[in-house]
Amino acid sequence: MAAAAELQGKYQKLAQEYSKLRAQNQVLKKGVVDEQANSASLKEQLKMKDQSLRKLQQEMDSLTFRNQQLAKRVELLQDELALSETRGKKNKKSAESSSQLSQEQKSVFNEDLQKKIEENERLHILFFEADEQHKRLEAELRTRLEVLETDAAQHQAVVDSLTRKYTDTIEKLQNDKAKLEIKSQTLEREAKDCRLRTEECQQQLKNLQAALGSRLEESLCIINEKVPSNDTSMYCLGFLFNFGYPSGGSTRYELKCISCKKYWTSEQTPGGSNQYNALNVPLHNRRYQLKLRDLAGQALAFVQELVTALLNFHTYTEQRVQIFPIDSATDTISPLNQKFSQYLHENASYVRPLEEGMLHLFESITEDTVTVLETAVKLKAFSEHLASYLCFLRKILPYQLKSLEEECESSLCTAALRARNMDLHRDMKRLTAIFEKLHTYVSLLALPSTKPTGLLRTNYNMVFTNIATSLHGFHDILKDISKHYSQKATLEQDAPTATQKLLTTNDCILSSVVALTNAAGKIASFFSNNLDHFTTSLSYGPKGGTEFISPLSAECMLQYKKKAVAYMKSLKKPCADSVPYEEALANRRVLLSSTESREGLAQQVQQSLEKIAKLEQEKEHWMLEAQLAKIKLEKENEKLKNSLSGHLTETTQERSVLTNVAEQKKETTEKSPRELIKNTSLIGMLAITTDNEKAPDGESREDLIKNHYMARIAELTSHLQLADSKSVHFHAECRALAKRLSLAEKSKELLTEELKLASQNISRLQDELMTTKRSYEDQLSMMSDHLCSMNETLTKQREEIDTLKMTSKGNSKKNKNR
């Protein structure tokens, strides 16, 4: 389960990184689109400038042509003037009247020529200035185009790196998925093993319950026989009641105490028994203690998560104060932020004790103790640690609020950021207030262990319900803080002055706030789910007593309980010998290691029964064969007896030979008193023992042959049984392997289907991406074509306007000349 939780945390981190990279990719895409639009606009401006340059060149050509015409005209006029002067010399007298007219015309021509020269100079100056301006603009546009091309190349490189990174993350996720599937299979196997173990544990539990029931009956018999009963309704602890019934109808009676040897009347005892009844040993509910220890362990795990989240939150807040609005690496931050970061640096000394206090409280709850609020002494230490952390929050609250106000006053803060900072301003105040509430209720719960009169038992239920509502309020406040921080982080990410260090710090703060919110939600749901158990368990106490008087009395009560347990152990009889634990574990491992099922065992039993029947049939067959062999042996003996009478000479020779053989046997037996004569055949090996004593040859040979065949049959049957058992074992293993193979094939089919679905999703997403990309490219091409057509129409209109202006100017000049 721990490995699954770590993998889940890794998946969450990967998902967060993926979302961040996706947001960055969108921002980069926007930047690339903007730069492309800027480059397109600059290209259009360059086209317009080229067109204007062409116009100016046309105007220049027209002006040069006009100047040439004017120069020719001036030359003609000068020639005419020269001719007129020569004519004037010839006929001065005749042309006195016409000289005045020629002078007037000359003055007019001079004026006209002077105007044309001035206009020509002015046009030359304008053309030079326009040419210089066009060159400057062309240089600026070329430099800007180069910068934009480099920016576009950088953005394209960033986009390529992000796509590579996304592909790497996808591959990593796929690998993690495969690993998780393998782990899930191993966990399923472990679950099967756990089921088997639970069945065994249930069986052991039944056996233990039966054994404990028998022990309980024995202990009850011992208690009834040997332990005196105490009346819990009277004043003294050691009463043996000696009721004296008075005469005269009086209801007064007397009691005699064993310990103090005093007599107590019924008038002296009312109302005084509850205090001493609190010292009675309560009924020990082991199930209740185990449940309470389990709940304390869960609470410890949640508090550890909360502590780590708080440490990360304060640490990353300190890093942010060092970075924004002024970076401490480049400039000195304000003294307010310096003090705030100094206080935040001390957060571990206030946060870590919360985990330690909860750990001590968890360790104080054991199976042997009686845990109620009066005996939970370690709750006071946890309350003190919570109070110290509350003092820390109160100390840093004004600095945190002033730091947020300083961020709002900076020039980099926009209106939206200012609104988010004010939301966080309110949230931090609410957070400190909810911690004050929680500290108040926890300190109230710690009162019964120090001052029993400080909190009545009737108010316990109200205190627990208020703690549950405060925890839910704490969770709601943290959700608001998480929402406002995420909005603030997105706004700062879009800001142009945001550095990479600030963005990473914001991401870290956001992840710590999310972890803090999750931990608070777990604690609130855990407390609200187990609220009934907390409230109902408070009535758990001594029988006959309404309450514990003080922690001292509770400690005395626990000492009495230990004494009672020791006394019961001394009365307990020794148990009978049972199977040793190690041997039982070995037997259990043998049982678990065998893969045979009930069907396999039944098949083995059937096969063994069939083999027994076959062996019995073979036994009957061999019994018949032995009887037939005996009959043949008797017949052969009779034949031998009949043949002995006819072959006396042969027997005498045989006897002599036998005597010689007997002498040789005696010599060999002196060396070795007994040895084996071996005869090998296809059936087996025949062993014959020769002793010093003589035995009949026929009987000894029959017995030897019989023993040999019986041993051989036994050996063959043992080999056959061994081979059958091995074959059954291999058959069971083959069945188990076939089942595993079928399960593996099923899992393989499932994985192939999931892989197909994943590949289909990937192809579908790629198709969608291509279609969107094509649509955007088509739209951009259409817009660029439209802009080009509009620019061409504008240039045509301007050219027409310029030509009309030129024609109108020419017409006006002609009219003036006329």
Image (tube, rainbow, N blue to C red):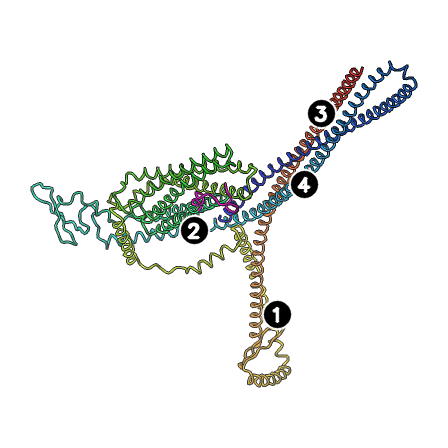
> In the picture shown, does residue 570 fall above or below 181?
below
> In the picture shown, does residue 114 fall above or below 24?
above
The reply to whether dot 1 and dot 2 touch (C-beta < 8 Å) is: no
- Where is residue 154 drawn, in percent x and y? 65, 41
Q: Earlier in the sequence, mark 4 or mark 3?
A: 4
Q: How far apart are marks 1 and 2 (CA)?
A: 54 Å
For label 1, the residue is: 684
- Where is residue 690 drawn, in percent x and y? 56, 79
Amino acid at dot 1? Gly
Residue 150, numbered circle: 4
Q: Does the magenta stretch include residue 329?
A: yes
Q: How far apart are marks 3 and 1 (CA)?
A: 115 Å
| Residue sitting farthest toward the front | 93
For label 2, the residue is: 201
The reply to whether dot 4 and dot 1 touch (C-beta < 8 Å) is: no
Q: Under tag 1, what secondary structure? A: loop
For label 3, the residue is: 790
Circle 3 Cα neighbour tier, 10 Å, few/some/many (<14 / 14–19 / ≥20): few
Viewer-nearest residue: 636 or 77: 77
Q: Which of marks 2 and 4 is nearer the N terminus?
A: 4
Mark closer to the observer (3, 1): 3
Q: Earlier in the sequence, mark 3 or mark 2?
A: 2
Residue 770, numbered circle: none
Amino acid at dot 2? Cys
Mark closer to the observer (1, 2): 2
- Where is residue 381 drawn, in percent x and y? 34, 48
Q: Is residue 343 magenta?
A: no
What's drawn in magenta, residue-wise?
Answer: 325-341
Q: Under tag 4, what secondary structure? A: helix
Viewer-nearest residue: 212 or 53: 53
Q: Quadrant of the C terminus?
A: top right
